[in-house]
Image (cartoon, rainbow, N blue to C red):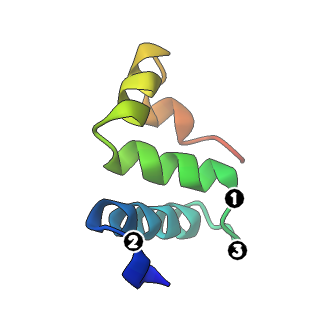
Amino acid sequence: MFEHFDERARRCVVRTQEETRRLGHAEIGAEHLLLGIAAVDEGLVGAGIERLRVSLVAMDGVGD
């Protein structure tokens, strides 16, 4: 499946998995994906999150 992903998408999936484990959750949810995208994406998503004045620190508690 990963052969269809570009490098940035692969990094996002890996970061999403890391965030899921770090938070002690058994399954990946939308909140983990959001953290993974925000951590990797320097483009549109990152700019949108920044424009909303949401920090990764604030998002860290998402889904708890």
Q: Residue at x 54, y 36 (%)?
A: 59
For marks 3 and 2, give the one nearer the viewer: 2
Residue underneath mark 2: 5
Q: Residue at x 39, y 21 (%)?
A: 50
- Please give left or right for residue 14 compared with residue 19 in the image: left
Q: Where residue 40 appears, x then y in whole percent?
A: 33, 50
Q: Residue at x 42, y 15 (%)?
A: 51
| Residue in the foreground of this view, choosing between 2 and 20 | 2
For marks 1 and 2, give the one nearer the viewer: 2
Q: CA distance from mark 3 to mark 2?
A: 24 Å
- Indicate the amino acid at tag 3: Ala
Residue underneath mark 3: 26
Identify the element where label 1 is drawn.
loop
| Residue in the foreground of this view, choosing between 1 and 51 | 1
Based on the displayed image, in which of its 4 quarters is residue 8 positioned? bottom left
Identify the element where label 3 is drawn.
loop
Q: Where residue 13 appears, x then y in whole percent?
A: 46, 67
- Please give left or right for residue 60 compared with residue 64 in the image: left
First in residue order: circle 1 vs circle 2 = 2
Residue underneath mark 1: 29
Crowd tier of the residue under label 1, counting other residues whose Cα lies within 10 Å: few below 14, some 14–19, many 20 or above: few
